[in-house]
Image (cartoon, coloured by chain):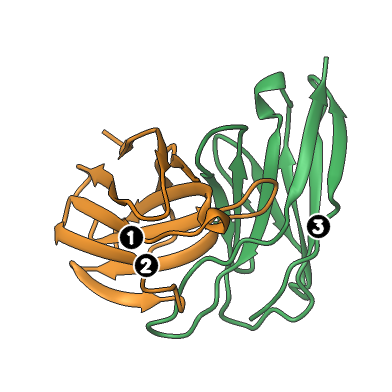
Amino acid sequence: DTEVTQTPKHLVMGMTNKKSLKCEQHMGHRAMYWYKQKAKKPPELMFVYSYEKLSINESVPSRFSPECPNSSLLNLHLHALQPEDSALYLCASSQEADYYEQYFGPGTRLTVT
Amino acid sequence: DAKTTQPPSMDCAEGRAANLPCNHSTISGNEYVYWYRQIHSQGPQYIIHGLKNNETNEMASLIITEDRKSSTLILPHATLRDTAVYYCIVRVDIPGRRALTFGSGTRLQVQP
């Protein structure tokens, strides 16, 4: 199984809402990632977890709060977002944080109203 | 970070080889070149990577020049399903900071 799953596929939320994105992999990978992708732009790295610990935070605003409850699961908690946060949020995993090949999920399309 | 330069778009006829160039003139000696692609409405997909030598797998071939300042991804027999944005990435080789930084990529359109 080389699949990374993400839920929900689409999410619309108001600026005062609190929501969470979920990502799951069952490949035994020990590194997991969150990327943000705006329309017609390349993915931008947000966070890296290695062995369930946050290893890279690319100066992401605190309204985005990642969580890695176990090695298979990665969450991104959202609170007080702005309309400019509307984007495709991609999750990825790899065997180790330094490993070459990352497997990406299909993404969650987020719209902030 | 070693930056990459790619043409914004290319066309290729179905069944022909697609040759996608990438310039990475500031690459360091221990930095790898990766290629990913992103088909519309999907997450990026790993294709291939290399350091110095040419590499081949079931998807593509990667040709890296001897001075390592540029590389070419070759899809030997392009199909319509290869229409995608192709990203050439140089992975920063700093312990604790090894991460992929995507550039703007090349939008490959395979024509029937």
Amino acid found under the numbered disc labelled 2: Arg
Q: Which residue is mark 3?
A: B6
Q: Residue at x 56, y 50 (%)?
A: B48
Q: Which residue is mark 2?
A: A63
Q: For mark 1, name the chain.
A: A
Residue B94 image offset from top left, x and y in percent:
47, 85
Q: Residue at x 45, y 49 (%)?
A: A89
Mark 3 vs mark 2, foreground winner is: 2
Amino acid found under the numbered disc labelled 1: His
Q: For mark 2, name the chain.
A: A
Secondary structure of the residue carrying numbered label 2: loop
In the image, residue B3 sits, relative to residue B81, either above or below, namely below
Q: How far is mark 1 from mark 2, CA to CA?
A: 5 Å
A36 and B27: which is toward the camera: A36
Q: Residue at x 80, y 30 (%)?
A: B109
Residue B108 image offset from top left, x and y in percent:
78, 37
Q: Which mark is residue A112?
A: none
Left or right of B23, for residue B62:
left
Left or right of B20, for residue A100:
left
Q: Quadrant of residue A34?
A: bottom left
Chain for colour green: B
Q: Residues within 10 Å of mark 1 (few under 14, many from 20)?
A: some
Left or right of B78, for residue B99:
left
Secondary structure of the residue carrying numbered label 3: loop
Q: Residues within 10 Å of mark 2 (few under 14, many from 20)?
A: some
Which color is chain A depicted in?
Answer: orange
Residue A45 image offset from top left, x and y in percent:
49, 65
In the image, residue A18 sits, relative to residue B90, either above or below, namely above
Q: Which residue is mark 1?
A: A79
Secondary structure of the residue carrying numbered label 1: strand
